[in-house]
Image (cartoon, rainbow, N blue to C red):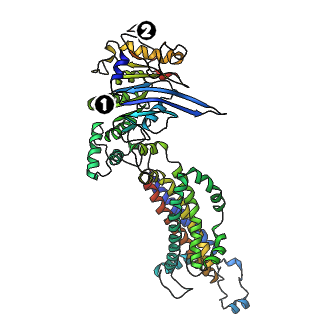
């Protein structure tokens, strides 16, 4: 039923059979992943979760056009992508601000790249608007070195949003931040993306981050030869708040499901491949009516809190 | 307690005074040294016998000569008698032309070399061989081909300034962080705009380091080059005063070479500070 529903929707982003291979020492090649298929709808917030080495950053870089897939193609809005584009903004893990430019210089650089003919005043006005949006008003003239880690990442977000991309791509954008800052930034990103209907693909290794932000959570098995095990539809209501999310029905069901996957199934999935598994249509899981064995009973506190604690 | 700066300044002054005092004592003729000159020889040379004075000037003589020179820096009484300011201007002019040409050549070429790992590898052996050659070794070749001593001096400045700038520019451009380049790529920034808005500012501190090394070498080399080619310039001044046996003037020349070298370095240091960014 679920598959049928996804199929009928337009595939705004369609990852079609992409592969990533590296030449292995001593001839041959190592396959990080191959024959990967994934559709993403317009306005959807998708998180990709997996252990280090499963190639999730490669998937994002291919989506961004920064890397070429060894095989396969990515179609965005009906067009196969070839190289980077202003339609797809990237928020980098290490903020990647230009340290010799001020905050407004960094955002303005993106704005003037998007609208080449825009006047200086126009560029500045637009940059200011997005600096406001991420709550950095009053810091326009500071250099990145004068900002805290969280503020720098806010500038990175402002820069990415300022070019009004069709798709926002995020590579573990909050992993270098402390827990408190991470929380506020997640709130901001969720608020902004929901209010603008932004299509987002985000890489993370933080289960809670994925549950809070994502509409769909893509689970990748361990590399090499990683694959998409399943796509979990987030059962939580659209109106969710960070401080009460753990009281939502199904919260523990989905959380346990994700943690179970990262702890064991990401390793064993390939050996115990479910019957009828089709790489082109990775199974869509809606919790509450799980297709497989029931997850751990609700209301137990799962362990560990953050999957990335072990690799 | 006074600040460190004030104390350091006081100590500097004290050291300077002590040095001058020692110097003065060292050149003052002592009574015990006996008759310094054979009276016959002195008569022949037209020097007074009494108060045999060392040829080495004391600090006061040098200060006096310095004052004389500073009073009339730009007089010109023909080829062998020009004001010190004029001589310095000749030297600085040569350095600026040779060094300026080197900047114009080294920075763009270094940029291209830095962008292409292939070019970097291919040209590296040539640069490594050419770099350690003493610039004065080029002088005969320059004189033979250019047939003009003044231009040859400029060429020598050029050739000694070019290598540190070339190497540093290529290195700085090649070492631009990949994430900054990726930012430019995702923003679809064209190659020219990328070169000027991302690569150049990112490599600027390294390029300026090369420029600073070069200006130091150029100033060292111009003195020697001018001693060789003669005519004008501070190097020629020093050599000429040695021929005149005016040690006081030689010392004045040495002092000014140091001061101008320091000023050139300060200018480049200031520029370097301006393009350096904290991360």
Please give the label number shown on residue A193.
1
On residue B132, the disc is none
- In the image: residue A143, left or right of residue A266: left
Q: Chain of mark 1?
A: A
- Tell me: A26 left or right of B19: right
State the residue in front, B189 or A108.
Answer: B189
Residue identified by numbered label 2: A296
Mark 2 crowd level (few <14, some 14–19, many ≥20, 10 Å Cα) = some
The one of B167 and B125 positioned closer to us in this rendering: B125
Image quadrant where one finds the N terminus of chain A: top left
Q: Secondary structure at mark 1?
A: helix
Are the numbered discs 1 and 2 placed on the same chain, yes or no? yes
Residue pictured at 49% horizontal, 37% vertical: A68
Letter of the chain that mark 2 sits on in the rendering? A
Asked whether residue B248 appears in the rendered view, the answer is: no
Quarter where residue B196 is shown:
bottom left
Is residue A251 depicted above or below A135 in this figure?
above
**Residue A214 in view in this figure:** yes
Q: Position of residue A50 (x, y in %)?
A: 47, 24
Q: Is residue A129 above or below residue B131?
A: above
Dot 1 or dot 2: first in sequence order is: 1
Q: x and y percent of residue B249 in the render?
A: 57, 78
Residue A43 spot, x, y in % from top left: 31, 29
SS at mark 2 in the image: loop
**Badge 1 density bin: few <14, some 14–19, many ≥20, Cα 10 Å:** some
């Amino acid at each position: 039923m679920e598959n049928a529903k996804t199929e009928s929707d337009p595939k705004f982003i369609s990852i079609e059979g992409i592969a990533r291979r590296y030449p292995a020492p001593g001839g041959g090649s190592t396959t990080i992943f191959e024959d990967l298929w994934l559709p993403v709808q317009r306005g959807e917030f998708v998180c990709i979760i997996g252990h280090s080495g499963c190639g999730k950053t490669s998937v994002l870089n291919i989506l961004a056009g920064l890397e070429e897939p060894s095989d396969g193609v990515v179609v965005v809005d009906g067009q196969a992508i070839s190289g980077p584009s202003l339609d797809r903004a990237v928020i980098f893990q290490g903020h990647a601000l230009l340290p010799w430019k001020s905050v407004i210089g960094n955002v303005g650089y993106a704005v003037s790249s998007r609208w080449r003919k825009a006047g200086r005043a126009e560029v500045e006005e637009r940059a200011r608007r997005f600096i406001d949006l991420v709550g950095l008003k009053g810091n326009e003239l500071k250099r990145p070195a004068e900002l805290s880690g969280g503020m720098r990442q806010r500038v990175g977000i402002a820069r990415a949003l300022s070019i009004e991309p069709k798709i926002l791509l995020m590579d573990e954008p909050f992993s270098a931040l402390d827990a408190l800052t991470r929380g506020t930034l997640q709130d901001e990103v969720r608020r902004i993306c929901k209010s603008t209907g932004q299509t987002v693909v985000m890489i993370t290794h933080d289960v809670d981050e994925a549950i809070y932000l994502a509409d769909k959570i893509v689970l990748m098995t361990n590399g090499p030869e990683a694959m998409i095990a399943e796509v979990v539809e987030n059962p939580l209501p659209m109106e969710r708040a960070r401080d009460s999310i753990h009281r939502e029905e199904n919260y523990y069901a989905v959380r346990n499901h994700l943690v179970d996957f990262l702890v064991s199934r990401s390793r064993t999935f390939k050996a115990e491949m479910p019957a009828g598994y089709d790489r082109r249509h990775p199974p869509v899981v809606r919790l509450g009516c799980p297709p497989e064995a029931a997850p751990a009973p609700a209301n137990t506190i799962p362990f560990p809190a953050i999957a990335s604690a072990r690799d | 307690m006074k600040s460190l700066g004030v104390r350091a300044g006081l100590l500097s002054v004290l050291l300077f005074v002590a040095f001058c005092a020692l110097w003065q004592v060292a050149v003052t003729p002592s009574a015990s040294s006996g008759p310094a000159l054979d009276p016959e020889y002195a008569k022949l040379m037209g020097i007074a016998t009494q108060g045999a004075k060392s040829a080495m000037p004391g600090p006061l003589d040098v200060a006096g000569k310095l004052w004389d020179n500073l009073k009339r820096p730009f007089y010109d009484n023909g080829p062998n008698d020009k004001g010190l300011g004029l001589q310095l201007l000749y030297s600085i002019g040569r350095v600026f032309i040779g060094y300026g040409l080197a900047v114009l050549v080294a920075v763009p070429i270094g940029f291209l070399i830095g962008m292409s790992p292939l070019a970097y590898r291919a040209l590296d052996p040539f640069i490594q061989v050419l770099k350690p050659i003493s610039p004065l070794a080029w002088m005969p070749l320059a004189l033979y081909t250019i047939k003009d001593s003044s231009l040859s001096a400029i060429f020598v400045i050029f050739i000694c300034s070019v290598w540190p700038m070339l190497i540093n520019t290529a290195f700085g451009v090649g070492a631009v962080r990949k994430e900054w380049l990726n930012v430019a790529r995702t923003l679809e920034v064209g190659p020219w705009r990328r070169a000027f808005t991302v690569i150049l500012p990112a490599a600027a501190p390294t390029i300026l380091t090369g420029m600073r090394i070069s200006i130091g070498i150029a100033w060292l080399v111009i003195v020697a080059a001018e001693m060789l080619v003669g005519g004008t310039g501070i190097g020629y001044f020093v050599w000429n005063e040695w021929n005149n046996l005016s040690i006081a003037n030689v010392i004045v020349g040495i002092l000014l070479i140091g001061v101008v070298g320091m000023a050139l370095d300060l200018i480049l240091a200031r520029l370097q500070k301006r393009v350096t960014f904290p991360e």
